Image (tube, rainbow, N blue to C red):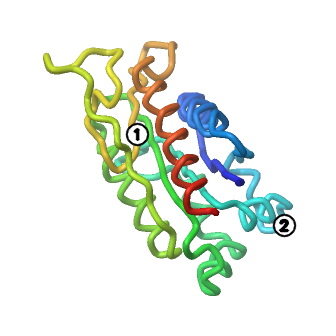
């Protein structure tokens, strides 16, 4: 079972989330996981072959101005991807997504909604986040899904803090990668 993680990261925070998602996916027996930085997917990139063969795609983007970063959006508008959309080449593949921004809200759900819509237009099957918020007292920094998103994991990387995404957000990303891989394994049989 092959899983492709395609992401853009401007400050390294989305990269940390992508690595956590990959770690979770790789924990599932039989998973072959590859990470692709958005700029690697040019018109003549050999990486399109892996994406075509992949059973699942997971997309990651920082939330910039309330939406997907321009670098990841460019991937969705390349000639190779548009051709695959027109031919229905990725229909029935598993899809998922995650995002990070500096603020707790930051319109991250809009970014996930954009990733979901693009995936659905490709005919893909979206896997949501199944982690309920762990905190019963309003949540704390280390809770999983403390920001309350079920479309996919979200993370906060506060400005001025160089620690990257908060630990609970990274653990939520790892669990999400595991979930996507488990569902992919069931459906890829």
- Which residue was labeled with disc 2? 44
Does 133 appear above or below 138? below
Write the residue at 30% across / 42% down.
Answer: 149
Residue 168's place in the image compared with 103, above or below, is above
Q: How far apart are marks 1 and 2 (CA)?
A: 31 Å
Query: For numbered disc 1, what is the local secondary structure?
Result: loop
Q: In the rendered image, is residue 36 in sight? A: yes
What kind of element bears circle 2?
Answer: loop
Q: Determine whether, in the image, residue 127 is placed left or right of residue 38.
A: left
Task: Give the residue at x 45% y 17%.
Answer: 167
- Tag on residue 31? none
Q: Nearer the viewer, residue 135 or 186?
A: 186
How far across and how far down the image is residue 100, in percent? 43, 36
**Can you see residue 10?**
no
Based on the displayed image, in which of its 4 quarters is residue 20 positioned? Answer: top right
**Viewport quadrant of the N terminus:** bottom right
């Amino acid at each position: 079972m092959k899983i492709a993680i395609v992401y853009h990261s401007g400050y390294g925070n989305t990269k940390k989330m992508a690595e956590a998602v990959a770690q979770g996916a790789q924990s599932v027996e039989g998973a072959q996981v590859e990470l692709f930085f958005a700029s690697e997917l040019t018109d003549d990139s050999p990486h399109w072959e892996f994406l075509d063969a992949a059973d699942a795609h997971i997309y990651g983007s920082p939330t910039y101005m309330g939406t997907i970063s321009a670098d990841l959006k460019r991937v969705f508008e390349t000639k190779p991807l548009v051709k695959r959309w027109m031919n229905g080449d990725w229909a029935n593949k598993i899809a998922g997504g995650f995002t990070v921004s500096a603020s707790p809200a930051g319109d991250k759900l809009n970014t996930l909604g954009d990733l979901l819509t693009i995936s659905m237009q490709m005919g893909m099957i979206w896997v949501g986040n199944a982690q309920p918020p762990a905190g019963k007292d309003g949540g704390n920094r280390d809770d999983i899904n403390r920001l309350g998103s079920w479309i996919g994991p979200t993370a906060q990387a506060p400005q001025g803090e160089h620690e990257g995404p908060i630990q609970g957000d990274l653990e939520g990303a790892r669990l999400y990668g595991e979930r996507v891989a488990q569902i992919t394994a069931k459906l890829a049989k």
